Image (cartoon, rainbow, N blue to C red):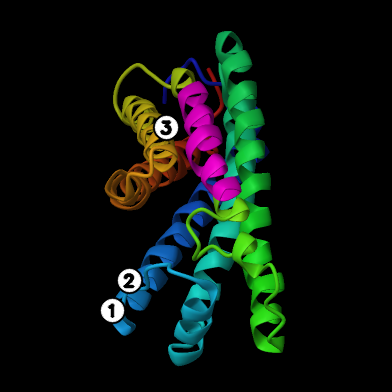
């Protein structure tokens, strides 16, 4: 384990381990649900609200809400994970780790609010057929106000959190892999935000799905191992 990290507080390291493991698991749940939806029903492309309502009533599936709930939990675990990184960071990297935590908190607030709206307000409104104004809170509408809020979280704030978390790691071995994964994720997220602002569907799809998914899984799996090792050691 890199001696630049302090694992004197084993509780922080163990908290980081479980948060990283849980984040990896919830992200995998999302991927499985996403794949199940892609296979189990036709692709939906937004045109208008009546078309969306007809689609969800023709192809009901619990996988969509499971995926959203998994991302809500992921956001909470990611904040805990960044807090644990801040706890073990070397003194010279504490400031960067705190900034990563602050940007990660902004990411969590924005994306969690979005997913909670989808599983509560949107679901209930569709069930009760109270559809007035629903276009601006639908995830399916890529340019609704709530969708833009969600993209702000996933692109700008997750990207900035990743950039500021990267300097905490370094050296060689696992820590270097985590550093590169954070840097890659920062680039991927910000590229996705630019693609969204420029209405480039291809850029958004590629960055926000396979590229971001791969980077996040490397980060969370790597950090689970990193904290697992650290939780059973004290700095010499």
Q: Is residue 139 above or below residue 209?
A: below
Q: Give whichever of 234, 225 is nearer the camera.
A: 225
* Residue 153 is inside the magenta segment: yes
Is there a contact, CB below 8 Å, between mark 2 and mark 1?
A: yes
Crowdedness of circle 3 by 10 Å Cα count: few (<14), some, many (20+)? many
Q: Which residue is mark 3?
A: 190
Q: Kindly identify which residue carries mark 1.
A: 39
**Which region of the structure is painted magenta?**
148-165
N-terminal-most mark, 3 or 1: 1
State the residue position of label 2. Answer: 35
| Magenta stretch secondary structure, dominant | helix
Q: Left or right: 141 with respect to 207? A: right
Asked whether residue 142 is in view, the answer is: yes
Q: Nearer the viewer, mark 3 or mark 2?
A: 3
In the image, residue 87 lies in the stretch drawn in magenta: no
Q: Position of residue 229 (x, y in %)?
A: 45, 37
């Amino acid at each position: 384990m890199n001696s630049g990290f302090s694992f004197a507080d084993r509780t922080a390291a163990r908290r980081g381990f479980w948060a990283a493991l849980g984040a990896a698991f919830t992200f995998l749940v999302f991927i499985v649900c996403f794949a199940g939806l892609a296979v189990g029903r036709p692709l939906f492309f937004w045109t208008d609200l009546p078309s969306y309502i007809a689609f969800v009533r023709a192809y009901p599936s619990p996988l969509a809400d499971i995926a959203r709930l998994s991302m809500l939990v992921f956001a909470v675990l990611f904040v805990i994970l960044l807090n644990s990184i801040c706890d073990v960071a070397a003194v010279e990297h504490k400031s960067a780790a705190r900034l990563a935590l602050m940007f990660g908190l902004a990411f969590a607030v924005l994306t969690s609010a979005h997913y909670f709206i989808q599983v509560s307000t949107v679901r209930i409104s569709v069930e009760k057929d109270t559809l007035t104004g629903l276009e601006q809170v639908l995830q399916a509408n890529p340019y609704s106000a709530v969708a833009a809020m969600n993209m702000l979280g996933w692109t700008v704030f997750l990207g900035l959190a990743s950039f500021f978390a990267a300097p905490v790691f370094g050296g060689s071995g696992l820590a270097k892999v985590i550093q590169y994964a954070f840097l890659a994720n920062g680039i991927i997220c910000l590229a996705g935000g630019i693609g969204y602002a420029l209405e480039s569907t291809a850029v958004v799809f590629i960055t926000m799905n396979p590229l971001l998914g791969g980077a996040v899984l490397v980060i969370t799996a790597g950090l689970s191992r990193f904290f697992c090792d650290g939780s059973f050691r004290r700095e010499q």
